[in-house]
Image (spheres, rainbow, N blue to C red):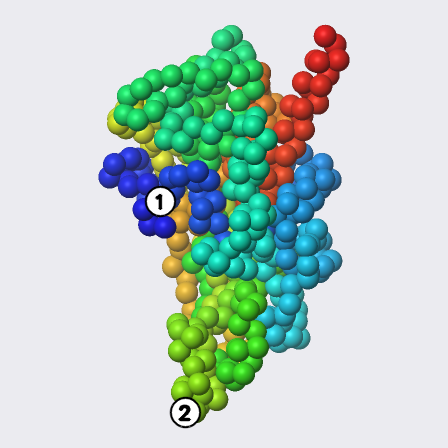
Amino acid sequence: MAERFVNDFEQPYEQIEPFAWLRMQGVGGRLLGWEGQSYRFSELDFMARAHDGYGTNWPINYKRLVPYYEEAERYLRIVGTTDNIPQLPDSIYSKAAAQSLAEGLIREPAAKHLGIKVIPARLSQRSFAKREQRESDERGYTPLGAIEQGLRTGRLTLRTGAIVTELIVEGNQVRGVQIVEGESSISEAYANVVFLCASTLESTRLLLRCACLKSNKTLGRYLMDHVMGGGAFGYVDMPKAALAASKREPQRIYIPRFRNIDHRITNGFIRGYGIQGKVITDSPEECLAEKSSRVTKTIRLRVVLSAFGECLARYENSVALSATTDRWGRPNLAIGARWCKNEERLMQDAATQCTRLLEVCGVKDIQTTSMLSTPGLAIHEVGTARMGENPEESVVDPNCEAHAVRGLFVTDGACWVSSGCQNPTLTMLAITGMACEVVTRRFNLEKRRT
């Protein structure tokens, strides 16, 4: 896996403020390291400004994305439970998640003492098997599996080892892309529709090079990533028999956002955070071995709670083209983003709540964590080419098509207006599905006219 990551010395970027830009090479990009956590946004996320007065509402609402969420969930075969939580809408599940040790340990004390709801993590089917054990048909349940299915249709050409360096635009119509293969072989690929879904900052790098978009004052602005660092961990002694009985179930839980649902502000911050939890042991095989069971009937497990908090969209958090270039002649990116007081207070609150939760669950030797992550480390960066109705205040329209370039669609995290606190992959898939249907309808309409 390590060899998949981009070497920052070979492909550098400038850090105006500390930023960890984690990139992966290979077909599938960072999906190669995706854990499978899949959560919908709610109307509270899309209309956040209407709730607390900060920032900008999305130009699309939850209702519009529902059919595309459902399509993505059926394809991914999400495993979870129906929980009826307004701020975390239920998904379409391939099967119900069985209760894990983590949920059994935390759920009832959390509800009784803190009024917090604990649910099983909603995971793609791919999370249930180690990579080397996965059957070929299981790959079809992942976003990466769509490439394999597309190749089987005979209508998809996959060019590996090729890097898109520039968009080809004539007037206000996209015509294709310029490509570099190897070190210097330059070619062009032509199309009337181009989708940028190269990951947030790579898509924006291409947009920043497009002459038609250089006058857009929002392009490259409002960079966001989930803030991490607030949490706690401790230890619990568990009967080995209980661990053996649940060893086939993912020991993952999720605590949906519970702050600022009915209120605008709590403890000096707006928005909120979700908490991901797990129960782990360093060597389950050794701990479950028969010889070990003769010594003791219990095993010491570590319980970990980690918060992912929403980052507010701020104009000053940005990316721009650098004066330096990489070995393919592309301008490097200069990235500058920092947390504000709201993110700091979010994580302080998260650390306090995670510690309290472990205490009421009887966890021992608790240690609180509160040092904020470096922006980028969550690997959930979004923004910099936001969608909106007004071309003066956004880069793409509510269909994800660039205001200034017809046929150019941006459907990864770059088009996001706010970050929410949920893992972004499922919503990225839904947004891409929405844009694909827009293009399909347009072509069908034009075909009927001719």
Residue 405 vertical position relative to residue 73 in the rendered view, above or below = above
Mark 1 lies on a secondary structure that is: helix
User: In x, y percent, where is residue 331?
Assistant: 32, 25
User: In x, y percent, where is residue 156?
Assistant: 53, 28
Q: Is residue 298 left or right of residue 61?
A: left
Q: Which mark, residue 295?
A: 2
Looking at the image, the residue that sits furthest to the left is 9
Q: What crowding class fits label 1: few (fewer than 14 Cα within 10 Å), some (14-19), or many (20 or more)?
A: some
Q: Residue at x 43, y 81 (%)?
A: 289
The amino acid pointed to by label 2 is: Val
In the picture, residue 159 is in which quadrant?
top left
Residue 394 vertical position relative to residue 293 in the rendered view, above or below = above
Q: Residue at x 36, y 50 (%)?
A: 1
Q: Is residue 173 left or right of residue 59?
A: left
Q: Residue at x 66, y 71 (%)?
A: 111
Q: Residue at x 25, y 36 (%)?
A: 10
The amino acid pointed to by label 1 is: Arg
Q: Gap in Å between the C-alphas at discs 2 and 1?
A: 42 Å
Which residue is denoted by mark 1 in the rendering?
A: 4
Mark 2 lies on a secondary structure that is: loop
Can see residue 273? no
**Mark with earlier residue (2, 1):** 1
Residue 344 vertical position relative to residue 201 in the rendered view, above or below = below
Residue 388 vertical position relative to residue 16 in the rendered view, above or below = above
User: In x, y percent, where is residue 2?
Assistant: 33, 50
Q: Which mark, residue 246?
A: none
